[in-house]
Amino acid sequence: MSAAALTSWLLVALLGITCVWMLWMAATQTDLEQEVRRAGGVLIVQRPPFSYERFIGALLGARPEGDAYACLWGTEVDDAWIARNLSSLRSESGLELNLCRTNVGDDSVRQLTTLKELESLDLSETIVTDAGLQLFAKHPTLACLSVGGTPVTSTGLQFLPTLPELRYVGVDAAQLDEKLLVTLQGCPKLTSFILIKADDATVIRLVRHPSFRLLILQREAVTDQSLVLLATHPELTYLCLRDCAVTDAGVNALQLALPKLQVDRKTTAESEQEWREMIEKRREETSEP
């Protein structure tokens, strides 16, 4: 066989392999999309900005820009569902996975650690524990992790500095103790936090971490006292206040101190309603004709 013929044969073979791979990827993605829809969620591929939090976070570089976003928030997804769809999840590059308020536990975490291109994982308000979560130690791509409202403690979060891409962490006030603050100091890329069940005392602790640019606080126990503290952080670019007992005067004073700061005030009920409406809208847009 001549060199020219061999080259042509190799090109044809490469093209064939590429076509087979693309067909397999499309079929896998279709399977995953159907499974997510059956569960009551939505799979967004190369998605547009999905919510105010995601949009602002993307602008600030706080949230990873994955290729696929699987939102299963508030569904009945459990460990068995994760096991059944693991191979399809593994085929997604740059995956963002929202499992908030689902029935997943440590068995799911063990399986999800095999997703080497997982970039964002929301496990808030699940039954995941320290033992399961620590299996994510040294994960190469995980940039966003939320575990507020779970049995996870600051001890279970001591692995966070082993995540080289970590930029965003979501916890609750009970988890944000002195041990976790020390742990966070070892995360050089960390710039964004969501703190649920917060109060002024936890904000006092949080402001000791000097590099945050995006901050989401939730609970009535956050008052103008917290805003006074936040006014000393010129790096802060976006602040969301959910259910917080702050006053207009307090917010105005904060924005005078930090004129570039964007402040978003709303209730948790309003935020959750936005999620439901957006999920339903996306499900309608991606449904078969």
Image (tube, rainbow, N blue to C red):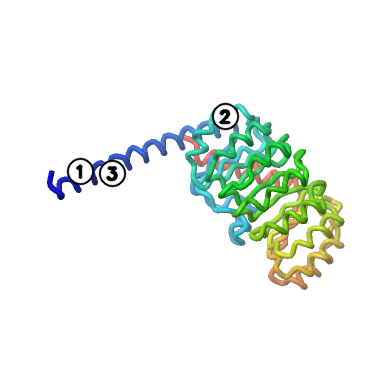
Circles 2, 1 touching at the beta carbon (< 8 Å)? no
The mark lying in front, picked from 2 and 1, is 1
Q: Earlier in the sequence, mark 2 or mark 3?
A: 3
- Asked which secondary structure carries label 3, the reply is helix
Q: Secondary structure at mark 2?
A: helix
Residue 180, image x, y percentages: 77, 52
Mark 2–mark 1 distance (CA, rounded to whole Å): 40 Å
Q: Amino acid at mark 2?
A: Ala
CA gap between label 1 and label 3 equals 9 Å
Position in image of residue 234 (x %, y %): 73, 70
Three-letter amino acid code at the position of disc 1: Trp
Where is residue 3? Give x, y as percent.
Answer: 15, 49
Do labels 1 and 3 touch, CB within 8 Å? Answer: no
> How packed is label 3: few (under 14 Cα within 10 Å), some, or many (20 or more)?
few
* Image side of residue 82 versus residue 221, left or right: left
For mark 3, what is the residue?
A: 14
> Where residue 223 sits: x, y (%)?
86, 58
Q: Which mark is residue 217?
A: none
**Given the image, on which type of amino acid does mark 3 rest?**
Leu
Q: Quadrant of residue 249?
A: bottom right
Q: Quadrant of the C terminus?
A: top left
* Residue wearing tag 2: 83
Q: How many C-alpha atoms fall within 10 Å of the one at disc 2: few (<14), some, or many (≥20)?
A: some
> Distance between the Cα atoms at labels 2 and 3?
33 Å
- Mark 1 = which residue? 9
Residue 103 position (above or below residue 60): above
The residue sitting at 62% across, 35% down in the picture is 110
Please tell me whether residue 47 is drawn above or below residue 28 in the rendered image: below
Evaluate whether residue 106 shows in this view: yes
